[in-house]
Image (spheres, grey):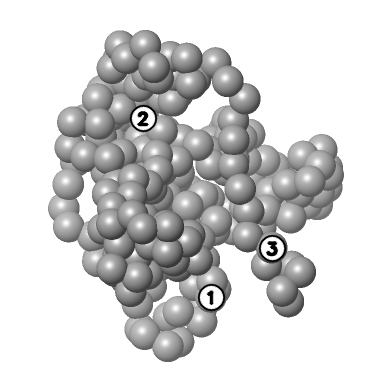
Amino acid sequence: TFLVSKGISEAGYKMALSGLGGDEILGGYSHYRFLSLLRYIWAIQRLPNALESSVRGGLALLTGRRRDKVRRLLNCKPASPRDISLVQREVLSPATVYELTGVSLTSGNSMREAREEPPTDFLKLVLAECEFYLQSMLLPDADAFSMFHSLELRVPFVDVVVIQHAATLGARTGRVHKSDLVHALGDQHLHRLMTKKKRGFSVPMQNWM
């Protein structure tokens, strides 16, 4: 965000649109696929210890490139979609966090305000991703890095109407596709863009290192 904001500012622009929030709210991250594994993981946890260990190892191998994340997920024995987000976003282990701060990440929700739980696993993961990642890291970082270059960054996905619509769809169907949002808006230009191959860019971090 810092480097892209620098490039946009040097090109003479004062404001930019960002897709921040889209992957969290619309389930764009690959670990949203782990939701389908939860019921199998819970079933595995009820097996005898020796058999559980063998099944966990086999399941991790079956997932190919993602097996490291799956192995971590299996080892943490997730009790809810919130645990998927914790495993995905953790920098320090829960034990280290407790040692440094006295805050337990596994013994309830003492730091969360009381609220009604979302009705589906998909929406529970959306809520956790918004709390752990979007609200705590992405938005503050994006604000600081863009303002360093005097660039005004707008985040249209982080909008009450968008989030409410996505939540309504998620409660009804169990998940949301980006195409659902395009159909809801009814904009022909967005429909044309949706049919094209996804475009992206990367920063050559490996080369620099």
What residue would you read off at disc 3?
A: 204
The residues bearing labels 1 and 3 have C-alpha atoms spaced at a distance of: 26 Å
Mark 3 / mark 2, whichever is N-terminal: 2
2 over 20 or under it: above or below: below
Say which of marks 1 and 2 sits in front.
1
At 47% from the left and 14% from the top, the residue drawn is 192
Image position of 72 with respect to 40: above or below: below
What residue did someone put label 2 on? 120
The answer to whether one can see residue 65 in this image is yes
Dot 3: few (<14), some (14–19), or many (≥20) neighbours within 10 Å?
Answer: few
Q: Give the residue number, with chain letter if any, for mark 1.
A: 92
Is residue 5 visible to the viewer in this orientation of the structure? no
Give the label on residue 209, or none.
none
Question: At x 42% / y 64%, what residue is drawn?
Answer: 10
- Could you tell me residue 17's position as x and y percent? 34, 45
Looking at the image, which is closer to me, 163 or 174?
163
Mark whose residue sits in front, 1 or 3? 3
**Corner quadrant of residue 101:** bottom left
Q: Secondary structure at mark 1?
A: loop
Residue extending farthest to the bottom is: 100
Residue 56 point in image, percent of width and height: 75, 46
Residue 117 image position (x, y, % from top left)? 25, 40
Q: Is residue 2 above or below residue 13?
A: below
In whole angstroms, how far apart are the C-alphas of marks 1 and 2?
28 Å
Return the residue nearer the eye: 96 or 56.
96
Q: Earlier in the sequence, mark 1 or mark 2?
A: 1
* Amino acid of disc 3: Pro
Q: Quadrant of the C terminus?
A: bottom right
The three-letter code of the residue at mark 2 reads Thr
Q: Are marks 1 and 2 in contact (CB under 8 Å)?
A: no
